[in-house]
Image (tube, rainbow, N blue to C red):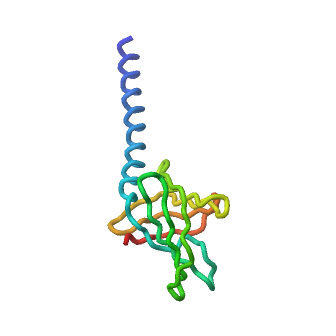
Amino acid sequence: MKLIKKYAGLLLMLTLLVGFTSCEDDEDIYDDLMGRTWVGDLWFGFDDDPIESGIRLDSNGLGIDYQVYDYDGKPAGDLPFRWWVDYGTLYLDYSRSYAVREIRGVRVRGRYLQGDLYLDGEYIDYIELKMQ
């Protein structure tokens, strides 16, 4: 009986440790991203007409994507979006007009946000956005 209690207690502690660790990771990512503007390519344009995104992530789960044409620096327009982090993935939901952007395995290294970009669940490319 003592052995069962010992293993049950150990199993409970490991379960709690794993649960708290995953939540802290998302909270850490959230804190690193929030309130900053990240600039780079989120695959809105085409090869001959690229658009650079400058995404501002606010603490209320909303953001603005300040888009400009790469080739001439002129504004392409601002797009509002909703954002959240779940299990190490940053989600950018621009509404029904655009595919949901997922940056999986998102991490912040110095002034760079890095991860793998997916559009509607399909892998696109490794991306790197720079903090402004």
Pick the quarter of the image with the N terminus.
top left
In the rendered image, residue 64, in percent from the top left (x then y), is placed at 49, 64
| Image quarter of residue 99 | bottom right
**Foreground residue, 97 or 23?**
97
Pick the quarter of the image with the C terminus.
bottom left
Q: Is residue 103 left or right of residue 4?
A: right
**Foreground residue, 17 or 30?**
30
Q: Is residue 10 above or below residue 70?
A: above
Q: Is residue 6 above or below residue 23?
A: above
Which residue: 54% across, 70% down? 78
The residue lying furthest to the top in this view is: 1
The residue lying furthest to the bottom in this view is: 72
In the rendered image, residue 22, in percent from the top left (x then y), is placed at 42, 43
Q: Is residue 131 above or below residue 18?
A: below
| Image quarter of residue 31 | bottom left
| Image quarter of residue 36 | bottom left
The residue lying furthest to the right in this view is: 97
